[in-house]
Image: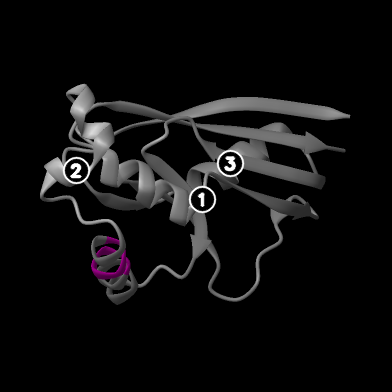
Amino acid sequence: MKVLTEYLSFNIPKRRDYVNITRPVEELIRKSLVKEGFCLVNAMHITASVYINDDESGLFMDYDDWLERLAPHEPVSRYRHNRTGEDNADAHLKRQIMGREVVVAITKGKLDFGPWEQIFYAEFDGRRAKRVLVKIIGE
């Protein structure tokens, strides 16, 4: 069995953004030489998410609108978590909604996606260094 563990690093200058990370993950699969197996991709920070969906700009705006309705950033005083001196309680809630990780099958050396599927890193409290774990396991 082959195993590859790597980290992708991000420093998103805005509080919130969405980054398509499919290509770097595909490059790591090629590097791993795994032809049949699984790829785990997970955010290593509790205010960020990894998810699968379509790479369409209108969808990113829809996510922003939807997430802001569910967990608005302001007023920051509405959240007990922010009494600790933070202002990112909304980012924790947004991450909970969008999820922590994805697992994708590797078939014939490639991510086994359905139509339009891509892997994204979602940042909800940017402006500092963050990481994503990529673990590839298989034969």
Mark 3 lies on residue: 41
The answer to which of marks 1 and 3 sits earlier in the sequence is 3
66 vs 74, nearest the viewer: 74
Please give the name of the residue rendered at 71% of the width and 36% of the height, measured from the top-left corner.
Answer: 136
Give the left or right position of residue 60, taking residue 53 as reference: left
**Of tags 3 and 2, which is closer to the observer?**
2
Position of 73 compared to 129: left or right? left
Residue 108 in the image: state x and y as whole percent: 80, 55
| Horizontal relation, residue 48 to residue 75: left or right | right
Disc 1 marks a residue whose amino acid type is: Gly
Q: Callout 3: helix, strand or loop?
A: strand
Give amino acid for label 2. Arg
Magenta segment range? 63-67
Crowding near pointer 1: few (<14 within 10 Å), some, many (20+)?
Answer: some
Circle 2 residue:
15
Residue located 58% across and 41% down the image: 41
Give the dominant element type of the magenta stretch: helix, strand or loop.
Answer: helix
